[in-house]
Structures are given as C-alpha cells and as structure tokens.
Image: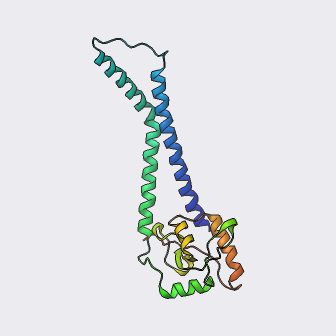
C-alpha cells in the first residue's frame, strides 16, 4: 500500500505541476503581448518605411514574449525530462510475461467467486460476471503478471479502468471488500509491481 500511494501521488503531482506550468507559460505570454499593445506604451522612434516599423514592433513583441516565457519554459522542460525518466523506468520494469497463465486465471476467478471485483456505483462491488483477468497495477507501468496483481473484472470495468494506476483509496476498498468473500486466513492484499532489473 505505501508503494502504491507514493507512485500514485508522485504521478498525480507531476501531472498537476505540468498543468500549472503550462498555465503559467500561456498567461506569461499573454500578459507580455497585452503589455506591449497597451495604448500608454512608450512611442517607438519611427523608421523611414512602414515595413521597418512593423518589423520593429513584431521584433519587440517577440523579444518580450520570449523573455516572459523563459522561466516557465525551463520548468516545463524539466518536468518533461522527469516524466521521460519515469516512463523509461516503467518500461524497464515490465514483466516479460504479459498474459496470466490458465492456473492464475482459474485461481483468481475462483477467489472472486466468478464475479467482477471492481467498483461499481457508490463504491460498491460490481455485480456482473467476471470475464477478464486485469492487472490491478497496470502491466504497462510495471505491474507483475502474478496472482497478487490479478483482479477479476467484467468487460465494462476492465475497459473503464484501462491502464490507469488505481488510487490508494481504490486499493484499500478492494482489500476491504475481499474480506467479505475470502476466508479469514486468505490474503486480501492486491497489487504487485516488478522490481527494476
């Protein structure tokens, strides 16, 4: 659970930081443009031709925008590099085996009593029959192809989840729901990630 929390909040923090930097970048560029176009701006010395004046105005605007977006642009580049490193590590973690074995599917489906283990409305367990074995922690992001990472899912829930990393709350609720239909001695933990090679 602590590992999933760390991974989930790190990725959520990266997404929010990237969104914030993009908003900062756009607003800095727009503010720079509007300050150059204000009627009270200092007059520029006129050139001999109209083309020269236009060139000067455009050059000044371009220089102003470039100066305004320098800081947020550097932050955006840094975030892109961090995201690329995270994605490269996920790729290196991928389990060489993508599909669950028949034995894992049989055990996972039996453990779930043939019903979907995902969340339906109001955070209750979905009541549809399970058709798929889903990687709780997505395979594409380093999730293991193991029975601990196996979750029985109906087609609708499997499509809806996709390759998203579940929230720590979703993991907690699934483990709590499993206590209702698993033997007291059985493990209710879900989610397993491949170690880095």
Q: Position of residue 25 (x, y in %)?
A: 48, 38
Task: Tell me if 34 is positioned left or right of 59 in this view.
Answer: right
Say above or below: 46 vs 68: above
**Residue, x 29% and y 18% (percent of image)?**
51
Within the image, what quadrant is residue 112 found in? Answer: bottom right
**Residue, x 48% and y 37% (percent of image)?**
26
Q: Position of residue 88 (x, y in %)?
A: 41, 61
The N terminus is located in which quarter? Answer: bottom right
Task: Tell me if 57 is positioned left or right of 181 in this view.
Answer: left
Say above or below: 137 vs 30: below
Within the image, what quadrant is residue 171 found in? Answer: bottom right
Say above or below: 38 vs 197: above
The C terminus is located in which quarter? Answer: bottom left
Task: Tell me if 126 is positioned left or right of 39 in this view.
Answer: right
Q: How many marks?
A: 0
Q: Position of residue 83 (x, y in %)?
A: 45, 55
Task: Tell me if 78 is positioned left or right of 128 in this view.
Answer: left
**Residue, x 53% and y 48% (percent of image)?**
17
Please tell me which residue lies in front, 153 or 78: 153
**Residue, x 51% and y 35% (percent of image)?**
27
């Amino acid at each position: 659970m602590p590992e999933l929390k760390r991974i989930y909040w790190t990725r959520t923090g990266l997404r929010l930081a990237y969104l914030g930097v993009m908003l900062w970048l756009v607003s800095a560029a727009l503010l720079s443009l509007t300050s150059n176009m204000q009627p009270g701006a200092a007059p520029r010395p006129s050139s001999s031709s109209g083309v020269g004046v236009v060139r000067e105005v455009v050059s000044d605007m371009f220089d102003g925008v470039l100066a305004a977006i320098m800081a947020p642009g550097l932050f955006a580049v840094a975030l892109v590099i961090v995201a690329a490193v995270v994605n490269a590590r996920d790729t290196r973690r991928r389990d060489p085996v993508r599909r669950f074995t028949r034995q894992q599917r049989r055990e996972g489906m039996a453990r779930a009593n043939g019903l979907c283990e995902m969340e339906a409305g109001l955070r209750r367990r979905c009541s549809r029959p399970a058709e798929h074995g889903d990687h709780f922690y997505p395979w594409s992001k380093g999730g293991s192809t193991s029975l601990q990472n196996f979750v029985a899912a109906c087609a609708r829930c499997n499509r809806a989840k996709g390759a998203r990393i579940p929230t720590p709350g979703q993991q907690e609720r699934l483990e709590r729901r499993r206590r209702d239909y698993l033997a007291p001695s059985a493990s209710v933990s879900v989610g397993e990630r491949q170690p880095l090679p």
